[in-house]
Amino acid sequence: MATGIRDKVAIVGMGCTKFGERWDVGPEALMVEAFEEAVQDAGIGKEEIQSAWLGTCFEDINAGKSGLPLSLTLRLPKIPVTRVENYCATGTESFRGACYAVASGACDIALAMGVEKLKDTGYGGLPNWGSDAGTLTWQWMPNLTAPGAFAQLASAYAAKHQIPMEDLKRAMATVSAKSHANAVANPKAHLRKAVSVDEVMAAPIVAYPLGLFDCCGVSDGAACAIVTTPEIARGMGKKDFVTVKALQLALSSGEEMGYNDWDVDHFVTTAKCSKSAYDEAGIIDPREEISMMEVHDCFSITELVTMEDLHISESGRAVRDVMDGFYNRDGRIPCQPDGGLKCFGHPIGASGLRMLYEMYLQLHGRAAERQLPDPRFGLTHNLGGMPYANVCCIAIVGRYEAKAH
Amino acid sequence: MHREYAHPPLNREVSSIAGSYILVREERLAHEGRELLYLLGYGVFDSTCCGVGGCAYALVPGFVVAWHTGERDGRPVSRVEPIVDESLRRRIEAALRKKETLSQVRFL
């Protein structure tokens, strides 16, 4: 009988670069920057790391294939290093590998690194996936675009819940404006600039109803975590450390895409993954027990619908919660306290670990101007792929002594 | 139904992480016996995860009911009647496309 990962892994050090147009550095320097902060935070030497995971998505134009870019860059002492990739969940997938290694007893101290360098490709946007998308994707969806697919989700959500499109657009604009407001206080964010709801609403459309401010951007960045067991963390002199309460992954089976049961109005994977995560963490009522979140806001509608798939907003009521300020920094469950993908951009391999970094800072009371009052449990969520077929990864972290309900 | 409309500043770039837009002109057009307010702008999507693109576009707050009736945050405010009727929207869009070079018409 599986017992889960709750409180079996402690995070003893984290690091995160400034995200942005980092023309002056390559992926190697980004990894070093994040790593130096993490080892200093953990108070260990790199020779104490026994296994490492590297998350990076577009390896061909980025860090390169295999675990070697990490082991060579950090001069890791001939230890196991594995590269992982799982779409936009890549960073958290790297974290999952390190956590499972520690929880299993395969090693005492492990490193999870995520990095992506997308600004020196010579073109805007993400690279064309080409044959990297597999042999069937372009046959299934020959004219597929991400904004097009998520715009369909927005339209279907509005239709199902009978929400006037202008109301949904204003709620999405409020989602974006909230993240921009939060990022102003974050020196590591790519874009630190407040925008008004009116400014968001006046932007041109990318794919109706999604406008310019509903879409996230590409960026450069790296983030990493050093994990160990609670017992070793105590032995290292750590007192108020953060542990992993849950770490869950759910991937589409193809049913959303292949059958008519799904209304294109929500993410089937997130709805399931979040329940598994709450079970693992011992959380019964997430609306009452989760203190803060970093969720995947590749598009504003993704964040809004995710509120419902996380079982925090009732079905069809996320618009009301957003407009009531429930997810604002001073609301009941602040969402994207660091600014989210909207202000950090989305260097894919780094994003999941960047989200965990914010939860880690908040739980330690080290988030400076962004600090939330007494957070107990932080949730991070990644969604890679499209509404009809995707990878969902959810982590819940909290102080070691914090118990649910 | 009327509403207050705060006129946005012109020729000021509004940037997001995915690109930017700029509103360059504000126009009033006689249309079907009424005065229509619209703005013209350009958007560039040059760093989105979605890809790359750009467009010229029009924003249509609605028919002018009362011009510059007040001020909000240093911006003049007018009273407008939003365009909600679909057939009227189509006629306005056709008129704007005939008059201006643009690829999007958005009704606020």
Image: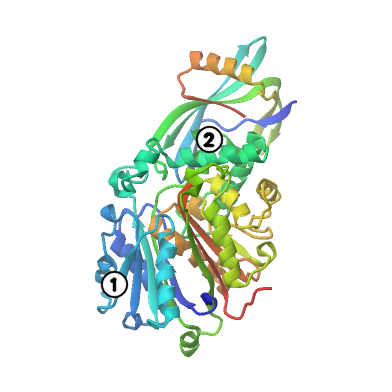
Q: How is the image coloured?
A: rainbow
Which quadrant holds residue B73?
top right
Q: Which residue is mark 2?
A: A203
Residue A137 lies left or right of residue A165; in this view the side is left
Are the residues at dot 2 and dot 1 in contact (C-beta closer than 8 Å)? no
Q: Residue furthest top?
A: B33
Q: Which residue is mark 1?
A: A74
Quarter that holds the C terminus of chain A: bottom right
> In the rendered image, is residue A365 in sight?
no
- Name the foreground residue: B16 vs B27: B16
> In the rendered image, is residue B35 in sight?
yes
Q: Residues within 10 Å of mark 1 (few under 14, many from 20)?
A: some
Residue A230 lies left or right of residue B78; in this view the side is left
Q: Residue furthest right?
A: B1
Residue at 30%, 72% in the rendered image: A81
Residue at 52%, 38% in the rendered image: A151
Where residue A200 appears, x then y in whole percent? Answer: 56, 39
**Residue A7 vertical placement versus B58 (above, below):** below
The subunit carrying tag 1 is A
The earlier-in-sequence mark between 2 and 1 is 1
Secondary element under disc 1, as helix, strand or loop, is helix
Q: Amino acid at mark 2?
A: Ala
Q: Residues within 10 Å of mark 2 (few under 14, many from 20)?
A: many
Q: CA distance from mark 2 to mark 1?
A: 43 Å
Where residue A92 appears, x then y in whole percent? Answer: 44, 64
Where residue A103 appears, x then y in whole percent? Answer: 45, 79
